Amino acid sequence: MIDNPKIKSWAPFEFASFRGLSYLFENPGSTVEPTTDGMLLRGDLENNKGLRLYRLLNRALRIRVSLVRLMERYRYCPAPSSTFHVTVADLVNPDNIGQLAAERRDDMLSVLRDLPHSLERPLLSRIPAIAAPEDAMRFRVKQLQIRRSALVAPLEACDSASARAVERIAAGRRDAMQYLTSGVPETWEPHVTLGYFASSSLLKAAGEELPRWNDLALREVEGECIAFGGVRLFGFESMALYWAAPAAQAHFA
């Protein structure tokens, strides 16, 4: 049984509609592609050297851990590697719509309904910016974890300057999230979401394999860091379709 709201079907596999707004780190290099509908997140893992950490993570899952085994045994649904990213702040999505401030609810629901074209609306510029530091922030993988129904790779700072930047950004993300919602923001731990499990009934068995997956994956990414230099607003229609806001809505270092 599929009980993950982000998954529509298993055979054939398809992501469900799951619309939201988030601040994401700007991936290194050119990772948004102009289309007739907007700027689509689409990273070229093979040719963009700045995305080497993503490429190694993707290879570790596909080859070392075995993506086929993950899918067959645990109903694992991989996120498209071209959309790998690190979320800075979950602003609006189906999980927190009930916490939206009353005076912003109608506007935000309209933005979600009309994605991606609604990303051009001036009202989005009122969301407090999250300022990035002058120098690029560098992160490495700590381990793999299962969080709720997702397989994620939590990140840690590669140096002390990046660690200090994380503390400053954490304060900025609280301001942005509290502008929109009445809830208390969860503690932020940067991570890359690698994929989702369609059925919660298989999470316990998958968790028992985590030590083995970590042993295999961490050897692949050992010593590799990824550098981020800015924060940008994105809208998403599903876990496979992300749109970047126009440059006027981006917040760079």
Image: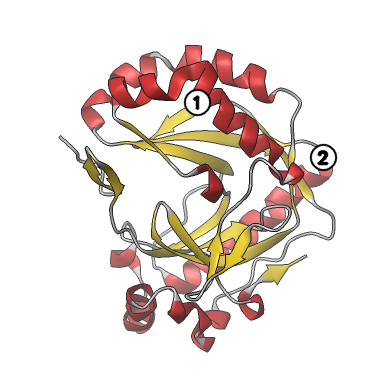
Q: Residue at x 31, y 66 (%)?
A: 97
Q: Nearer the viewer, residue 189 or 150?
A: 150
* Cα–Cα gap, marks 1 and 2: 32 Å
The residue that mark 1 highlights is: 62
Instruction: Tell me if residue 64 comes above or below residue 9 in the rendering.
Output: above
Can you name the residue that lies furthest to the bottom here?
122
Q: Residue 25 placed where, x, y %?
A: 64, 56
Q: Residue at x 70, y 37 (%)?
A: 52
Q: Nearer the viewer, mark 1 or mark 2?
A: 1
As helix, strand or loop, the secondary structure at mark 2 comes to helix
Q: Residue at x 77, y 45 (%)?
A: 162
- Quarter of the figure with the N terminus: top left
Q: Residue 224 placed where, x, y %?
A: 74, 30
Looking at the rendered structure, which numbered label has been put on residue 219?
Answer: none
Q: Are marks 1 and 2 in contact (CB under 8 Å)?
A: no
Q: Residue 67 placed where, x, y %?
A: 43, 25
Query: Crowding at label 1, few (<14), some or many (≥20) Cα neighbours within 10 Å?
Result: some
Instruction: Tell me if residue 235 comes above or below residue 168 in the rendering.
Output: below
The residue that mark 2 highlights is: 160
In the shown orientation, is residue 118 left or right of residue 34? left
Q: Residue at x 29, y 47 (%)?
A: 14
Q: Residue 36 placed where, x, y %?
A: 50, 76
As helix, strand or loop, the secondary structure at mark 1 comes to helix
Q: In which image quadrant can residue 199 be found?
A: top left
Which of the two discs, 1 and 2, labels the residue nearer the N terminus?
1
Instruction: Tell me if residue 79 comes above or below residue 151 in the rendering.
Output: below
- Quarter of the figure with the C terminus: bottom right
- The residue under label 1 is which amino acid type? Arg
- The residue under label 2 is which amino acid type? Ser
